[in-house]
Amino acid sequence: MSVRICSLDDIAVNSAVRVVIGETPIAVVKDSSGDVHAIGDTCTHGDISLSEGFVEGKTLECWAHGSQFSLTTGKPITLPAYDPVPVFAVSIVDGDVYIDPTPTFPT
Ligand code: FES
């Protein structure tokens, strides 16, 4: 079941915010196109919050060692991380952002 996170306008373009649904930390990202994505917030290389990193195109870069994670697949595009983070379904309803906290690992 999807959970309302915030208003779409609450997230700036090219930025990420950290939310926790249940015990699942999620990075909610608005890219330069205004599209919103949700991926696991914990880097798979270390215990670092990805939402503290950098949005670049359709990726979120970990500030610690520079791995970039795809916002669409959760897969790391650059080392040193090699395991993906989960991806969560996002829906926009009446200007509000909703996330389904069910983790997926798109291929
Ligand atoms: S902790 Fe994220 S790349 Fe190393």
Image: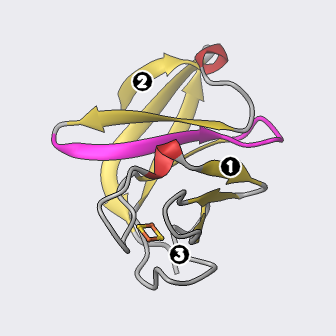
The quadrant in which residue 66 appears is: bottom right
Instruction: Report the amino acid beneath label 1.
Output: Val
Left or right for 23, reference 28:
left
Circle 2 residues within 10 Å: few <14, some 14–19, many ≥20: some
**88 to the left or right of 103:** right
- Residue 5 numbered tag: 2
- Element at label 2: strand
- The magenta segment is 23-35
Q: How crowded is mark 3: few (under 14 residues within 10 Å), some or many (20 or more)?
A: many
Q: Which residue is label 1 attached to?
A: 55
Q: Which of marks 2 and 1 is nearer the N terminus?
A: 2
Q: How crowded is mark 1: few (under 14 residues within 10 Å), some or many (20 or more)?
A: many
In the rendered image, residue 82, in percent from the top left (x then y), is placed at 46, 85
Residue type highlighted by circle 3 = Lys
Residue at the spot of label 3: 75
Q: Closer to the camera, 50 or 71? A: 50
Is the CB of mark 3 within 8 Å of ligand 1?
no
Does 25 sit above or below residue 8?
Answer: below
User: Is residue 65 toward the left or the right of residue 8 in the image?
Assistant: left
Instruction: Identify the element where label 3 is drawn.
Output: loop
Q: Position of residue 68 (x, y in %)?
A: 61, 68
Picture coordinates of residue 65, whole percent (x, y) = 52, 70
Judge whether residue 97 is colored magenta. no
Query: Which circle's residue, 1 or 3, is located before the other in the chain?
Result: 1
